[in-house]
Amino acid sequence: MKCALCNNEVLNLLGTVEFETRSLGKIQVPDLEYLECTGCGDKLFTSEQSDKAVDYIAKEEQRLINMLPIGEFMSANESAAILGVTKQAFSKHPKIKSGLIFSTIKSNRKFYNRKSVELFKKNGNGKFLLRRHVRPVRKYSLGNLINVDFPATSAEDSIEFKSPEFISAESTKRGLENEFERCI
Ligand SMILES: [Zn+2]
């Protein structure tokens, strides 16, 4: 399979891929299978692998939120008061529901991070950089895509592989941005 952008050979790789998000900064997602162009370095992910990356990042974000001191969190009532909305409006707000204000659950109740609520009030996004550890980036060749994972019987078959099952790293990045509303 050749790269659609530069026509160089594309390799099927398994390894760690680095993404960048507002809450985690540079984050290495391990064990992703993807295609990488030997020429321009463009990466392609299946939607399944892309979901896997988004899921990994969301879990890592939540893990770090849960490690913030509970004293830095407050109730939905207090948070709603700070934003000047009713508790009901607060709970139903789609951006808050999607996690743009960091929250944690204690004793079956949801608490919201104070700094995150204040950031959300200021610019509509309560995410801030959380501390994290960094994994080394490693990748292993799984050989050529056509020979290994998707045996092609003709050139036409191999052209079909390009779409729509694979989405570009750009799309995955955009997906992450939508997910996390990251600003570049
Ligand atoms: Zn290329």
Image (tube, grey):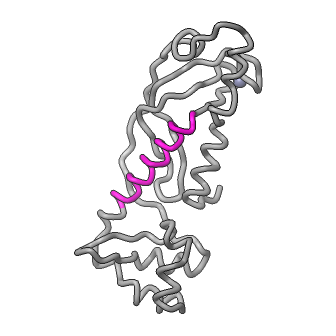
Most frequent secondary structure within the magenta stretch: helix
Q: Looking at the rendering, in which quadrant would you find the C terminus?
A: bottom right
Tell me what residue is drawn at x 46 percent, y 45 percent.
27
The x, y position of residue 95, in whole percent, is: 56, 71
User: What's the magenta region?
Assistant: 46-64
Is residue 118 rendered to the left or right of residue 156? left
Is residue 170 rendered to the left or right of residue 74? right
The x, y position of residue 51, in whole percent, is: 50, 44
The x, y position of residue 98, in whole percent, is: 51, 66
Tell me what residue is drawn at x 58 percent, y 33 percent.
45
Is residue 12 rendered to the left or right of residue 8? left
Tell me what residue is drawn at x 55 percent, y 59 percent.
180
Vertically, is 26 above or below 127? above
Q: Quadrant of ligand 1?
A: top right
Tell me what residue is drawn at x 45 percent, y 20 percent.
140
Q: Is residue 58 magenta?
A: yes
Closest to the observer: 164 or 29? Answer: 164
Total marks shown come to 0
